[in-house]
Each structure stands twice: as structure tokens, then as C-alpha cells.
Amino acid sequence: MSILNSIQSRKKYGITEKKKAELDALTNEVLDAQHTVEQFQSMVDSLTEKSERFQEYLTEATATRDQAKNNKDLLDDVVQNVLSLKNNSSIAFDETVLANEKMEEVSIGMKNLINELIYSAEVINKLSNIIIKKKAKNPLISDELIDMVNTIGKDANNAVSLTLVALQATYAAEATSIESEGAAAMEFRQAVQLYEILTGREDSIEGNGTPDENRYEGCLEYLIDEAYTKAKQDYEKYYIANQEATDQLNTATILLNKAQVNLSSLQSGLAAANAAALAS
């Protein structure tokens, strides 16, 4: 081999080794890029699953929160209705008591009137008897006077009878009013008890409400308020967690896209280098 051929052979060999080293370096970069893509793809898959799971949690938390809010609104309406019933029952009870007092006054007045009418009738009857006796002794006493006195006596007796009927009607009305008072009192007590069960707030016929913390913690209003508060807290928790998972997924997706673009570029470069090496 001539010196020239030896130099050319060594030169060619050197060029081939350099290309091989370049190809090996590109191949390693492609492998590294593929590994990076795989890592980011695995991360995206994991975060996608996590995001979907938290989205389901958020959906359930939203439904629970909305239902708890509806329950609270419904209970608030019921409490307001019971409170109105309690207040109206209290007013009706007070008015019934006042009516009974007035009716009792009327009954007492009518009894006094009857007593006076009976006394008047007795006096008139006695006067009539006296006049009749006088008439027997003194014919000059007119028959008209006797008839008038007899008429007055009958009218007095009729007045007593009519007043007794009115008094009986008054007693019957009073008995009905007393029953109404009892019914109003019972209705008011039941409204108060229902209000206490719902709200845990004690009340009385006088209307003096006294909160009871121990009873409130077991009442329906407390339980529904607690359920609504917890539902809102769970919603906020899963809303934040879902947002974080979504942000993490978006970031990982961006990194994956960049890694895929980089891998595609390196693969194109490696393919071009291999083609050039084969052509040389």
C-alpha cells in the first residue's frame, strides 16, 4: 500500500468513526427523549385518572350540597309556618280568654237582672193581691186598675221566663267558648312543642323564648344546619382538590407535548444522519 492510500484509508476510517459516534450520540438522545416521553405519559395517565376521580367526588359533593341546601330551605319554611301558627294561636287564645271574661260578665249581669225581675214580679203580685182584696171591700176601685196590675204581673213573669231562656243560651255559649278556649290552648301548646322540637328553643304561653343549647344540639334545625355546613365544606375541599388536579394535569400535558415534539425532532435528526451515513 502506498503512503497516499494509507493516508486516505486512515482519513476514511476517521470519518466513519466520527459519524458512528455522532449517530450513537443521537441514538442516546432519542432513547433519553423516549424515556422522558414515557415518564410524562405515565404522569399524564396517572393525573388523568386522579382528575377524573376528583371530578366524580366534586359532582357528588355538589349534589349533596344542593340537597342539603334544599333541606335547609324547606326546614326554614316549616319553622316560619310553625312560628306563625304559634303566634296566631297565642292571639286566638288571648282573644278567647277575653271573650270568656266578657261572657262571664254578661252572665253575671243577666243573673242580677233576673233577680231584680223576680223581685219586681213578686212585688207586683203582692200589689195585685192587695188591690183585689181592697176591691172586695171597696167596689169603687176600678176593674181597669185590677186588669192593668194583672197585666203588669203577667208581663213581669214573662220577662223572667224570657230572661231565663236568654241566660240559658248565655250559659250554652259560655260552655262553647270554654271549649274553644281549651282547644285554642291545646293548639297553642302543640305549636309551641313543635317549634321546640324543630328549633330547640323553649317557649311558653307567655311567649318568653329561652334557648337551650343541649336541646338545640339534638333538634332537627341543628342537624340539618350541621349537614349543610359539612356539605359546603366537603364541596370546597373537593373543588380545590379538583382544581389542583386539573392544573397538575394541564402542566404535565404541556410537558408531555414538549417532550413529544423534542422526541419527534430527534428521531427526524437520527433518521437523516443514518441516511447520510449510508449514502457516504
Image (spheres, grey):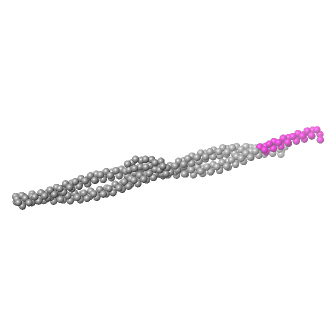
Residue at the image point whose x is 27% and y is 56% from the top: 170
Q: Is residue 11 left or right of residue 227?
A: right
Q: Quadrant of the N terminus?
A: top right
Q: Dividing the picture into quarters, in which one does residue 143 lie?
A: bottom left
Camera-side residue of 242 and 111 = 111
- Residue 144 placement (x, y as % from top left): 9, 58
Residue at the image point whose x is 29% and y is 52% from the top: 101
Residue at the image point whose x is 5% and y is 59% from the top: 138
Residue 268 visible at all? no
Camera-side residue of 172 and 206 = 206
Report the span colored magenta: 1-29
Q: In this view, does 130 lie to the left or right of 107?
A: left
Q: Quadrant of the C terminus?
A: top right
Residue 173 sits above or below residue 276 on the image: below
- Residue 242 placement (x, y as % from top left): 61, 47
Seen from this angle, which residue lies furthest bottom?
136
Camera-side residue of 97 and 215 = 215
- Whether residue 225 is in magenta: the answer is no
Q: In this view, does 167 lie to the left or right of 132?
A: right
Residue at the image point whose x is 56% and y is 50% from the top: 61
Q: Dividing the picture into quarters, in which one does residue 168 lie?
A: bottom left
- Residue 32 placement (x, y as % from top left): 76, 44
